[in-house]
Image (cartoon, helix red, strand yellow):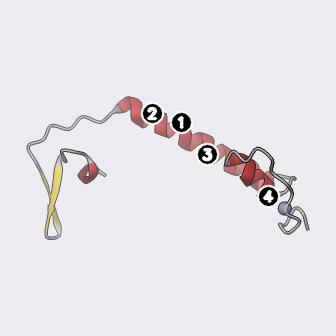
Amino acid sequence: MLSLESPAPVTKRGTKWYATPVFYQPDRQKIEQLTRIRYQEQEQMGEYMESQECLMAFLARALDDPDPTPCGKCAVCQ
Ligand SMILES: [Zn+2]
């Protein structure tokens, strides 16, 4: 992940990683924001696993489909 920063604080030569003179400080606000989103997604997956509605409709709604319809094929629909 550090190698994707620009400028990168690490570089790889051959099979080894080396620190570069670039000062690196993690973006704590961005990390907290992404962590919050990941926890929300994890919670949503738990809801999906317990869902009693069409699983495809659940996913469609999660992906902002304004009119999700039951698929008739998933485990819940069957
Ligand atoms: Zn279904």
Residue at the image position 62 percent from the left and 47 percent from the top: 42
Between marks 1 and 4 in the image, the one whose residue lies nearer the viewer: 4
Question: Secondary structure beneath disc 1?
Answer: helix
On whether ligand 1 comes within 8 Å of the CB at mark 1, the answer is no
In the picture of the structure, the residue carrying the numbered disc 4 is 55
Mark 3 secondary-structure assignment: helix
In the picture, measured across the screen, residue 37 lies left or right of residue 65, that is: left
Cα distance in 3D space between marks 2 and 1? 6 Å
- Residue highlighted by disc 2: 32
Q: Report the residue marked by disc 1.
A: 36
Looking at the rendering, the quadrant in which ligand 1 lies is: bottom right
Q: Mark 1 and mark 4: span between their CA atoms?
A: 24 Å
Of marks 4 and 3, which one's residue comes earlier in the chain?
A: 3
Alpha carbons under labels 4 and 2: distance apart: 30 Å
Residue type at the position of mark 2: Glu
Residue 28 percent coordinates (x, y):
36, 31
**Pointer 3 with pointer 1, Cβ within 8 A:** no
Q: Quadrant of residue 16?
A: bottom left
Q: Is mark 4 within 8 Å of ligand 1?
A: yes
How far apart in space, not on screen, are marks 4 and 3 (Cα)?
16 Å
In terms of sequence position, does the residue under pointer 4 or pointer 2 come before the other?
A: 2
- Please report contact status of discs 2 and 1: CB closer than 8 Å, yes or no: yes
Q: Position of residue 75 (x, y in %)?
A: 85, 66
Residue 23 left/right relative to 47: left
**Which residue in the protein does label 3 denote?**
41
For mark 2, give the secondary structure: helix
**Residue at image point 87% right, 53% down:** 52
Which numbered mark, 4 or 2, is in the foreground of this view?
Answer: 4
Image quadrant in which you'd find residue 38: top right
